[in-house]
Image: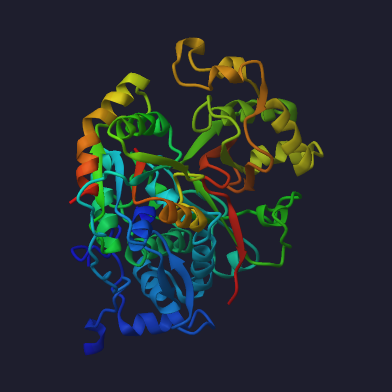
Amino acid sequence: MTNERVLLDPTSESTPMERNLSERPETMNGLTVGLLDISKGRGDIFLNRLEEKLSDIGIKTLRFKKPTFTKPAPVDLRQEIATKCDAVIEALAD
Amino acid sequence: MHDIDDIERRGIPAVMIASAPFEDAAQTQADALGLDISRVFVPHPVQDRTDDEMHEMADLVFNKVLDTLTR
Amino acid sequence: MFERSWTDGLPVVPPTTERVRKMLEGTTRSPDEIIVSVPPNLIECTVEKIAINAVMAGCKPDYLPVVISALETICTEEFNMHGVLATTMSVGPIFVVNGPITRDIGMNSGINVLGHGNRANSTIGRAVQLVIHNVGGGGPGGIDRSTLGHMGKQGFCFSENELSSPWSSLAESRGYNSSQNVVTAFTGEGPRLVMDQKSRTPESLIRTLAEHLISSVSSRVVVGMDAMLVLSPEHASRFHEAGWSKDRFLEEIAEIMMIDTDNIIAGSGGIEEGLPTEMKGMSLPKFKPNGLLLVQAGGPAGLFSAIIGGWLNGPSGSEPVSKEISA
């Protein structure tokens, strides 16, 4: 009964392709930062403050909010963010 | 994290901010996605904080957040 | 296998080629057919992968169609299994099976229905959880962030005692007929006992049930979270014998569970948790329409029922999902 010893793999058997992060700019000067609120309690207060501090140092911001923190943002929203922003900050998961 | 992954795929630098207990989950998800997503953690808990405490939290991580988005 | 992180902490049946081949005889579907994309990593999952995990869980081949359909219910946008895993709340998928298949495969809807001791009940839910763990990559401490969890996350599946009740079954109330085999998934906590050994009239017993349901998850949560009520045969008979229909039961209990928001505003009663002050002076239902799922099950003796508290409902959370089981 040698084949009794062969076990089939219950996992996905897939390892993701390792990718690198997008290239970062030297500085944020003159760029637009998207602030993506995940719609979890207190996140808006936190992002308000980040927005304030970004504009203090002359960085433009745009606000976005996804409908719910429990699911990925709708594809249209991600598209919109990608066309309007040079960088994105998402907050606040707890 | 799927949002950040998608935005990064579109060539836009992105960072997520979460509270400290999510460090493990973020690592697991980053491993599964194959992208070492930029992430910054704030102290837990969040839900019972006052507005002032939330502002302090934002001040605390502000420079770190900018660092993850620039070279 | 435990060291390879293939298990849920309990021993599993080694998935040998021969056992998996036998398991696949339980379905007419092709082993390489892709059934669902399994969260959280959204990995395409074949019948064969499901069969491997079903072997490990201890399933018999004739349970496989139920396991496959149970996976189909939770790998949907409405059920939002990724959210159910990631939440810190102590919830997991719970499966209720209706239809002739429950008798064919010997599922338990009687004594200890929410507990252990029946092979089909114990292994079907477990097989689903192993697929989420092994194929989807969603295990405790990784993507699963539950603060406390509950024992039912090992696998929570049972059938309804649908033959001895004049009321429609859960599946029938969700639009199926009694000859269809249906699995319904609900996101819930562990069950909690409701004791009422004195009520002899439906009017009295329904108040006890309502009083306990109001505290489901938190007495300060209204509308946003569902619950499942597992009504035992003896409790159910109080309503059946008095001629109450299921609709009447659900209407009357909803009426009793209208909540005066003044009592659950943040700060009321010296408790900081609660609704925002703007919501004062309102009357809100504890559960949204159809937010209370009624299932009849349990042993013949005992004046107890059980409440299974839910999680966030609606598009932000998880909605119950039913699917017909196909061979």
Indicate left or right for B43 with C317 as reference. Answer: left
Residue plotted at (82% across, 39% down): C243
Residue plotted at (34% across, 69% down): C56
Quadrant into which the C terminus of chain C falls: bottom right
Q: At which x and y percent is residue C188?
A: 49, 45
Indicate left or right for B40 with C137 as reference. Answer: left
Viewer-closest of A16 and A59: A59
Q: Residue furthest right?
A: C243
Q: Which residue lies furthest to the top in this view?
A: C270
Above-or-below relation of B9 to C317: below
Q: In which quarter of the image is residue C3?
A: bottom left
Indicate left or right for A18 with B51 as reference. Answer: left
Residue plotted at (57% across, 52% down): C110
Above-or-below relation of C131 to C313: below
Q: At which x and y percent is residue C184?
A: 58, 57
Quadrant into which the N terminus of chain C falls: bottom left
Residue A92 appears in the rendering: no
Q: Quadrant of residue B29?
A: bottom left
Viewer-closest of B54 and C323: B54
Q: In which quarter of the image is residue A69?
A: top left
Viewer-closest of B35 and B45: B35
Viewer-closest of C58 and C27: C27
Indicate left or right for C135 with C273 as reference. Answer: left
Residue plotted at (56% across, 30% down): C195
Residue C290 appears in the rendering: yes
